[in-house]
Amino acid sequence: MTILITGGAGFIGHTLTRQLLIQGHTLLLVDNFNHSYDPTVKWQHIQDLWHLPNWSLYQGDIRDSEFLNQIFRTHSVDGVIHLAGLAGVRPSLQDPAAYFDHNVNGTAVLLDAMRIAGVKRLVFASSSSVYGIRAGGTLRETDSAEGSVSPYASSKRAAEQLCLHHHHLHGLNVFCLRLFTVYGPQQRPDMAIARFIYQLYNNQTISLFGDGQSQRDYTYVDDIVAGISRAIERVKGYEIINLGSANPVTLLELIALLENQTKRRVPIEWLTEQPGDVPYTHAAIEKASWLLGYRPATDLKEGLRKMVSSYQQHPANGITTSL
Ligand SMILES: NC(=O)c1ccc[n+]([C@@H]2O[C@H](COP(=O)([O-])OP(=O)(O)OC[C@H]3O[C@@H](n4cnc5c(N)ncnc54)[C@H](O)[C@@H]3O)[C@@H](O)[C@H]2O)c1
């Protein structure tokens, strides 16, 4: 297939690109290289792909309809994987309007460009944050997603709804994938595990929010990429599908695993709970298994080992630059 990937220079985007190229697809990467984190990190991702054939890069903004229309006029695109957007809960509290502009307006412009071009397959990266604050139990796609507690979560939920409109009105086939905390080599530098590894290796204090008992369903990036690539092959109708590891761990367990992997310890500073953060995520992944044959293959210990080893080999690659 010829697949357009928005946000192709990002953490998940460039990891996905490598995998889809190995599978023989032709890829069009779209990214505006914004300053959500140091853009040189995103250019480094692109640099890492340079030796591979069958892809091209379009530097531009998904909110620019003419820019998108021009790409769709030039190429016969079979499907779109939509990863572009502002990610992360905490910064969304500082600038909610920007989150809605990129994540909601951007999605609306993209959907319209797809409609004009007659492209009928879309996979959209939504987020587990749409489930809001939950005390326990697995999070299922049929659960309510109307109680989000951050502008980021609300923007992802709104974008899911836009996808639903296009399914009903224009026959778009779309899978909205709710991703659960993705980690792995070259993780976004603002995310917790990347920060902790950097702080452990640089003898800096780690700041933790809450009492350390919050739980996250950390999911290795290769498992997420496998789920996304199955989704673009199989997308049909409109579905919301969780992609997680179904194995949540507490923040304290995560820190202990990282100390073990790195053989390092640094002081910990305890701070009050961050507003907007959800205390608990745990994906139900039966639907992903059934529709996509999704089976997460990398457990947290092994995933952290790979991430730490990648950091040791390339300490300046993706983690340190924007801290
Ligand atoms: N990483 C996670 O744990 C996680 C979890 C849930 C959902 N997601 C979603 O998955 C997607 C990818 O996440 P990531 O961690 O790779 O983030 P990332 O920030 O590394 O990648 C997003 C990319 O989109 C680009 N972008 C942003 N706005 C754009 C615009 N208007 N036009 C063109 N390009 C634009 C950025 O420059 C960036 O390269 C995001 O939509 C994110 O919300 C990620």
Image (cartoon, helix red, strand yellow):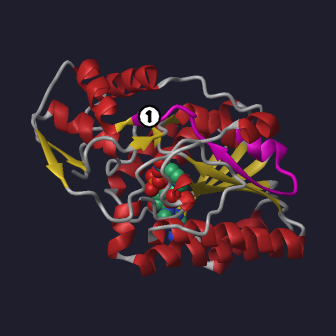
Please provide the residue range marked out in magenta. 229-249
Q: Residue at x 56, y 34 (%)?
A: 245
Residue 229 at x, y = what percent? 71, 40
For image coordinates 34% across by 66% down, the residue present is 91
User: Does the stretch in magenta take in 51?
Assistant: no
- Asked whether, in this view, residue 316 is left or right of residue 224, the answer is left
Image height check: is 233 above or below 143? above
- The amino acid type, in three-letter code, at marker 1 is Gly
Residue 247 painted magenta: yes
Residue 86 lies left or right of residue 190; in this view the side is: right
Residue position marked by numbered label 1 in the rendering: 184
> Residue, x 67% and y 43% (percent of image)?
228
- Answer with the quarter of the image where residue 320 lies: top left
Residue 132, percent across and down?
51, 61
Q: Residue at position x 14%, y 27% from top?
A: 265
The percent position of residue 280, horizontal first and vertical second, equals 45, 47
Locate residue 252 relative to residue 150 in the image: left or right: left
